[in-house]
Image (tube, rainbow, N blue to C red):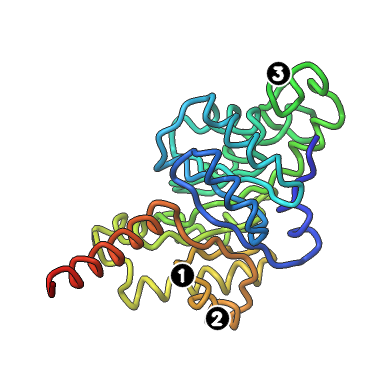
């Protein structure tokens, strides 16, 4: 079983840096890996177009880099299926979106944990890539790997924010990540993610999470945005999306060229 870099750093109390992919391209995974700059790549499966083979190829590419791990963002339904197939493909950590309550968070954790009397999860033995197909099927190494999955929860619903203290008390929650866009939408205020009161809710989440001993993770567009969060005590960041970076490059370079050519 491959070591889980994100789990190692989290347990050691060290900062972590990730980046998002919406595409499933192994080439982009390798380019990110060759940079040596990131501890993990989050495949934002909620937004991506993927098949089961894509998950395996994504994980294979990540495995080329011993000091980099992976994460899957799992949408609301079907949570258990996507979680099982992602972990089985070799993606090592999970971010759950769209949780409305502490009870839903408990269901997410059960989807990750092995089905042993002490873990009380639903993950059973399977001949999948993460277990070497035939090598570590349901053995102690595989079971321990399921226990070491980093579980992160999006706090992005009004009801989740109302139950935040209860969610942070659920055993197995390693990280929380505020989602201002969906939070605003759940309040009936689409497009108001940057309003002062919603930004205050993000700060409230950070403060309570740190108080409860759960690590807040921030999603930012560039490293310069991290300073205010670092000052609050945040040490975990996921920076940028491949599609956004590509769009911004096309916009900037294309428009720049059109301006130059307009003067010819």
Q: Earlier in the sequence, mark 1 or mark 3?
A: 3
Q: Are marks 1 and 3 in contact (CB under 8 Å)?
A: no
- In three-dimensional space, the C-alpha distance between marks 2 and 3, rounded to whole angstroms, equals 44 Å
Q: Which mark is residue 126?
A: 3
Q: Label 1 belongs to which residue?
A: 202
- Residue 30: name its quadrant: top right
Q: Are marks 2 and 1 in contact (CB under 8 Å)?
A: no
Pick the residue in front: 100 or 137. 137
Estimate how packed mark 1 is, as few (under 14), some (14 to 19) or many (20 or more) residues with alpha carbons within 10 Å.
many
Pick the residue in front: 239 or 160. 239
Estimate how packed mark 2 is, as few (under 14), some (14 to 19) or many (20 or more) residues with alpha carbons within 10 Å.
few
Q: Earlier in the sequence, mark 2 or mark 1?
A: 1
Furthest residue toward front: 264
Estimate how packed mark 3 is, as few (under 14), some (14 to 19) or many (20 or more) residues with alpha carbons within 10 Å.
some
Pick the residue in front: 255 or 201. 255
Circle 1 SS class: helix
């Amino acid at each position: 079983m491959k070591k889980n870099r994100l789990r190692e750093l989290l347990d050691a109390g060290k900062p972590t840096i990730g980046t998002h992919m919406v595409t499933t391209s192994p080439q982009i995974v390798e380019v990110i890996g060759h940079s040596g700059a990131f501890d993990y790549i989050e495949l934002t499966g909620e937004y991506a177009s993927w098949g089961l083979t894509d998950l395996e190829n994504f994980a294979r590419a990540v495995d080329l880099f011993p000091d980099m791990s992976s994460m899957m963002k799992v949408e609301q339904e079907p949570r258990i299926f996507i979680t099982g197939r992602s972990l089985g493909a070799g993606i090592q950590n999970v971010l759950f979106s769209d949780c409305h309550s502490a009870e839903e968070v408990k269901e997410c954790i059960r989807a990750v944990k092995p089905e042993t009397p002490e873990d009380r999860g639903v993950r059973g033995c399977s001949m999948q890539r993460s277990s070497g197909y035939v090598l570590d099927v349901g053995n102690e190494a595989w079971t321990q790997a399921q226990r070491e999955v980093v579980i992160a929860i999006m706090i992005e619903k009004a009801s989740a924010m109302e139950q935040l203290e209860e969610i942070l008390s659920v055993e197995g929650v390693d990280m929380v990540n505020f989602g201002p866009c969906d939070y605003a939408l759940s309040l009936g205020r689409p497009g108001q993610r940057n309003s002062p009161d919603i930004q205050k809710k993000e700060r409230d989440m950070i403060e309570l999470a740190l108080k409860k001993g759960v690590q807040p993770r921030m999603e930012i567009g560039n490293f310069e945005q991290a300073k205010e969060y670092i000052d609050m005590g945040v040490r975990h960041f996921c920076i940028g999306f491949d599609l956004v970076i590509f769009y911004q490059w096309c916009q900037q370079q294309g428009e720049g060229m059109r301006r130059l050519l307009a003067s010819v």
